Image (cartoon, rainbow, N blue to C red):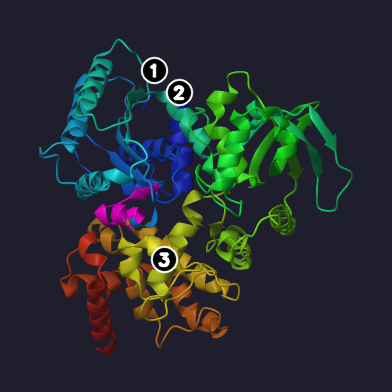
Amino acid sequence: MVNPIVDALLTDFCARQEIDPGDRSGAFEHFAAFGVLNAERLDQGEYQDALTDPGEEGLDAVAVIVNGVLVADPSDVNEIAQEASTLSVKYVFLQAKSSETWNGGEVLKFTRAVRHFFGDADIGTSAVVEAARQAHKAVLDHAAQLDENPSLKAYYVGTGKWDDSVAARKHLDELKSDLEDLDLFSSIQCDGIDGARLQQLYRSATSAATATVEFESKVTLPRIDGVEQAFLGVLPARELMKLLADDDGEEIRKSVFEDNVRDFQGGDAPVNARIRETINGPHRQQFAVLNNGVTIVVRELRVTANTFRLTDYQVVNGAQTSHVIFSSRDVLAEGQDILVPTRIIQTDDEDLITAIVTATNSQTEVKVDELNARAVSERNVEKFFAATKPPRNLLYERRSKQYDNQSNVVKARVIDRYTLVRATAATFADEPHLSTGYPMQLLSRLAGAKRPEEGRPRQRFFGDDDEPIVYYAAASAHYRLDLFFKTGRLEARLKPARWHLLRLARALALEGPTPAFENRKFRDWVKPFVDKVWSDKDGPALFLAAAEVVDSSGIELSRRSLRNTAATQDLGLAVDAVSAG
C-alpha cells in the first residue's frame, strides 16, 4: 500500500478494532467494509457479518439490509416481514484491493460475481454469499410489502485516485446496465471508491454527528443549573435539514434520534398527515405557531454570532416533525421554506437529559417501552461498564456512535444493545438458538415492552432492578470469544456456533441454576466465570473446551441448524455429560 494517509487510517482502524495489522490485505477488507457499511446507517448488525470467507473470488462483502437490519438469512427477512407492514431493502456489494492501480481484470471478477448473485450460476463456496442469496429470494417472496423496489450499490475499493478513463469504469457501467435490465431495483449505483473517498468514509464512521446551522431568530436563556448554554427560537427548515440529513443529503440521520422516546410513526399516522398538510397547504407560514417544534440536546456547541456548530447532538423531541419535514424537502426547496420552533440545549448531564426527554414529551402519552432509550437499567449498565478498569475495561453503547469521536476508545471493546441482548440471552437465559437465528424476538423482550407472552415465561432484559454485572459478564465473554476468533485461538469454522459457545462456556465454568437477574447473589455466583474468561490462560482453555463439546456432539455448524431449540437441547445434554464425567 502506497497511500500514506490511508495506511495511517488503516493502522488506527486495526488498533481500534484489535485486528492483526500484519495481515494488511485482510485488514484492508475489514477497513473498507467498515467505512462503506457505516454509511448505510445500520440499525442492527455488524460489518463483520457481511464479510465473505477468505479466498472468495470477486466479493469481499455482501450485505442485504432490510429495514435497517443487516440480515443473515431468509429467517431474518421473514421475521422482519411479520413485524413490519412495509419493507425497505438495500443490497451492498464490495470488493477491496489496497493497490493504487485499478486492475480491470479484478474489477471484471467483481462485476461477474454481482451478476451471478442474481442468477443461477455458481458464485463460490462462501456460506455468507449463499445465505445472502437465499435472503434475496425471501425478499422477493415478500415483494408485496416493499415500499419500493430494492436499491443496489456495488463498490470496487482501491487506494489510488479514481480515473473514469480506465477499463474499471467500463466494467462498472456494463454491470449497471445489466442490472437495470433485470427490472428489480429502484436505484443502482456501481462505482469505484478511491483513497480520498475511503478516507472520508472512515472519518465519518469514527466521528460524532456534526453540523453547522445559522440560527438568527433566537433568544439566549438565562443561567440554568446543569446547562452550559441554551437557546430558544425559530429555525428555517432549510437550516434544520442540515441537522437531519446525512453527508449526501439523501437519507435522514437515524443516529441523531437515539435519545428520542418515540420512533417515527410513519407518514400515514394522523399527526404526521396533519403536519404534511400544513407544510403543503395555505397555512404554511403559520407553521411556527401550529407545531411544537424540536428540542435538540448537544454535548459540544460552538457559537459565533448566529453560526452554531453542533457536535454529538440528539433530537430528543420532535421526531415526527423532523421526519415529515425531511420527506417534504423537495417542496421546501422550491422557495416554500417554513420556520420551525427550536430549542438547543448544551449539557452532558445524563440525569438532566432524561428530565428534558420526559418533560418535552409530556404533551402526549408515551408508552413504557418507548422510554427504553433512557431506561434506568441501561444507564446503570452504561455507568457500570464505564467504571471498569484495564485490562477488563468495556463500554456499553447506549446511543449509536456514542464513543465514535473519542480516539482513545478501542471500538472492539464497545458493545451495543443489539449485541449485548443476544450475548446475555445466550450466556444466561439458555437461548443461544434465538441469539443465532431470531434476535428480533429477544429485542421484543426489553423490560417494559408490552407484548403477549407465549408458553413459559421468558427472560426480560434491562429490568430496572437487574444487576449490571449480568450484562458485563455476558459482554466480557462475548468480547473475549471474539478476540480468540480474531487471533486464531479458535478456528473460524466455529463462528456459526459462537452464541452456543457462550452458553457452553458458562455451563462449564459455573455450577447450579442461574440466579434471577435482579438477585444480588448473581454477583458472587458469576465472579468465577468473569475471572476465567478474562484470564489469558483459563479463557482460551474454557472456550476450547466448549468447542470440544460442539465437535463431540456432531451438530451441523450452520445457522439453519443452530437456530433451532433442538440444537440448544442437544448441546445441553452434551455439556452435562462432560460435567458429569
Q: Nearer the viewer, mark 3 or mark 1?
A: 3
Q: Is residue 71 magenta?
A: yes
Above/below status of 133 relative to 563: above
For this orientation, the residue located farthest to the front is: 282
In the picture of the structure, the residue carrying the numbered disc 3 is 442
- Dot label at residue 161: 1
**Within 10 angstroms of label 1, few (less than 14), some, or many (20 or more) residues?**
some
Q: Along the line of sight, which residue is nearer the eye, 538 or 93?
A: 93
Q: Is residue 52 magenta?
A: no
Q: As shown in the figure, which amino acid type bears the numbered disc 2? A: Ala
Q: Are marks 3 and 1 in contact (CB under 8 Å)?
A: no
Q: Which residue: 80% across, 48% down? A: 227
- Dot label at residue 479: none
Q: Locate residue 145 relative to residue 471 in the image: left or right.
A: left
Q: As shown in the figure, which amino acid type bears the numbered disc 1? A: Lys
Q: Of callouts 2 and 1, which one flags the residue occurring earlier in the amino acid sequence? A: 1
Range covered by the magenta-colored residues? 69-81
Helix, strand or loop at mark 3: helix
In the picture of the structure, the residue carrying the numbered disc 2 is 196
Q: As shown in the figure, which amino acid type bears the numbered disc 3? A: Leu
Main secondary structure along the magenta-highlighted residues: helix
